[in-house]
Image (tube, rainbow, N blue to C red):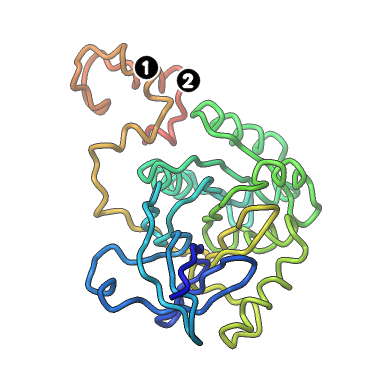
Amino acid sequence: MTEKEGLVIKKYNGYYYVASGGEIHTCKLRGRLKLKSFLPVTVDKVIFDAGGKEGMILWVLERKNLLRRPVIANLDLFIATFACASPDFTPLVADKLLVLAGMSWIHAVLILNKTYLAEEGEIKRLSETYKKAGYEVYPVSARKWDGIERLRDRINGRICFFGSPSGAGKSSLVNAIDPSYLLVTGEISRKIGRGKHTPRYAQLLPFAGGYLSDTPGFGNLLMEDLDVAPLEGCFPEFALYKGRCRYATCRHVKEIGCGVKDAVAKGEIAESRYR
């Protein structure tokens, strides 16, 4: 048996594609592992048997975090990517994505793409809203390469997930970050008989000592099954004002003497974030 440690870069059609030692190994699951609920997902570290035509994943190493939509593990950075215009920026969708990251204990940053389509005042307003909330904000233009170098420096050496609604320009952005992106995608795709860049599932692409996760954009983001208990912790700007609430159990909705509602009225917390 030839045991190795590797990283799952893609799961597709019952196979796992595991990067190890500069090679990509096509692997199946060991029978006993199939009976367990703790199955490998993209970005899992695994121990596998590399002997034979197909490798065999023997077990999954401990995860540091797990994102559930899409299912992907061990992320260093969650990059919520939105267009400033065409389509218009939607605060509710942006906040949903940032909440997903927060509930999974993944550090998140916000990308405002297509800056050339938006008024400077609007870009500044959006940036200040999320900077006040404690997020890093990167206004960029993938088309004109504005802000790309600063973003590259931020993601170097990290495993990053790009999450975005459809039409935000995520693919163009990732191509601007690394112009060889399509070439790399083609090399990995040939491994499974796909010859073009059509992301339908989470997969990893190597970049500057780390990886970029390439996933499809989404049309809708449902969150009805999420636990509401930790939700407040996903809005870090509330913490500055909740100590001013009259009641320790204040939910910041209808209570009198609410420090958070007072901060919203004064413009210190964005009303869109509060809603």
Q: How many marks?
A: 2
State which quadrant residue 47 falls in. Answer: bottom left
Q: Considering the numbered disc 1 on the image, is that residue within a helix, a strand or a loop?
A: loop
Q: Position of residue 178 (x, y in %)?
A: 74, 59
Seen as rendered, the residue at the extreme right is 144
Report the side of 65 relative to 50 (left or right): left
Q: Position of residue 40 (x, y in %)?
A: 38, 66
Q: Three-letter amino acid code at disc 2? A: Glu
Q: Position of residue 273 (x, y in %)?
A: 42, 35
Residue 241 badge: 1
- Residue closest to the eye, 137 or 267: 137
Q: Is residue 152 above or below residue 207?
A: above
Q: Considering the numbered disc 2 on the image, is that residue within a helix, a strand or a loop?
A: loop
Q: Is residue 239 above or below residue 120?
A: above
Residue 7 badge: none
- Residue closest to the eye, 44 or 168: 44
Residue 268 badge: 2
Q: Does any portion of residue 216 appear in the rendered image?
A: no
**Callout 2 touching callout 1 (CB < 8 Å):** yes
What residue do we see at 48% from left, 21% from top? 267
What residue do we see at 45% from left, 17% from top? 266
Q: Nearer the viewer, mark 2 or mark 1?
A: 1
